[in-house]
Amino acid sequence: MKISASIYSDKKRPLQEVVEDLVQHQVDLLHVDCNDDLSVFEDIRQIRTWCNLAIDLHIITETPEKYYDLLRENPVEYVTFQYENLTQPLEIPLDITGKKGLAVITPTSIEVFNEYSSFDFILIMATIPGQSGGKFDAVNFSKIRQFRKLFPSKSIHVDGGVNGEVSFILRNMGVSSSVSGSYLFNAPSIGHALMNLTNRSIESEFQVKDFMIPLSECPVVQLSTISLASVLKAIEEGNLGFCLVIDSDHTLKGLISNADVRKGMIRNLSDLNQINPNELINSKPTVLKENDSVYSMLQLIKKCAFPIMYLPVLEKEGKATGIVTFVNLIKAEL
């Protein structure tokens, strides 16, 4: 996940000193907030003389068209317009280069992105736009998951309340870029903050239930009606490499992975019709509790003698409530 440093969050130092510090610490992007202020482009022109870092421009305005010539004269790598401020549909001219994004605040449905399917990414504002130091609203974990499901080919950027703990969760959810402002500049040093933002092991105040994939979105088969066909269909449609096995009251009875199916086929090569799906079930998988913290989740993983790709999540009574997968986190670390 790329870190986009919000350059105006440092109120104490001259802009050039801030930018040069960020360059030295090898941030990925320079995030420039433009609250309907054309003079921002004077800063962009200056930044271009100081470094060649990619610029991540976020424009909040009712009149996007007045920025088009400035974007032609001063092309940026990423340009985002705030959806809620638009008074008419946004049509960015084709000759304006850079990746295009649509920013939405927490109450706005991500389905508004349907109107902008040609854009490259969504920017989810997890706090109030323009206000630094806010707390990340956990509702946005669900929005990220929903957007990924509806628009799997589009990138997700997040702005607001991103600290070390939130950064870990966002990386695990496959977020491409996160904007960091007050957290980055209020730390003992930028380097210290960046280390926390990219740390693989970080304690979190959020619980597993805040960011897990809920049971309603999980690949599931019922124990009472299980068949090889239903198992294969659930694994294929779930696209996660496994399915949960539950009974009628959602009590977890186990899981079946691609590997379990493969082993069952090897045992019955002479007649695949003899495969008993009940014999494929791993009835004692490693599991999480929905109230577990990120820290306790990581401690559990470290104790396992085998690689963990996914973990079922349970209530106290043993009922399945969701899953946590680590595919996106592994991809992000490559």
Image: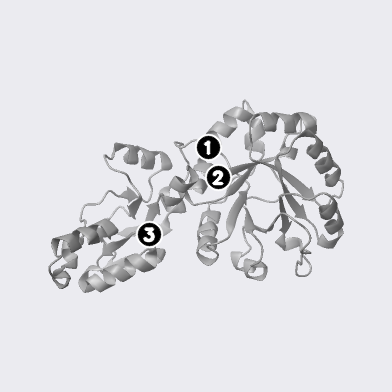
Q: CA distance from mark 2 to mark 3?
A: 21 Å
* Type of amino acid under label 3: Leu
Q: CA distance from mark 1 to mark 2?
A: 8 Å
Residue 246 placement (x, y as % from top left): 26, 64
Q: Which mark is residue 240?
A: 3
Quadrant housing residue 43: top right
Q: Which mark is residue 188?
A: none
**Quarter of the figure with the N terminus:** top right
51 or 239: nearer the viewer: 51
Residue 7 placement (x, y as % from top left): 73, 38
Give the secondary structure at mark 1. Answer: loop
Upstream in sequence: badge 1 or badge 3: 1
Residue at the extreme front of the image, as rendered: 270
* Type of amino acid under label 2: Met
Q: Which mark is residue 198?
A: 1
* Type of amino acid under label 1: Thr
Residue at 72% across, 62% down: 84
Disc 1 residue crowd, few under 14, some 14–19, many 20+, Cα 10 Å: some
Verify CB contact (< 8 Å) between mark 1 and mark 2: yes
Q: Which residue is mark 2?
A: 1
Residue at 83% across, 58% down: 68
Quadrant housing residue 132: top right
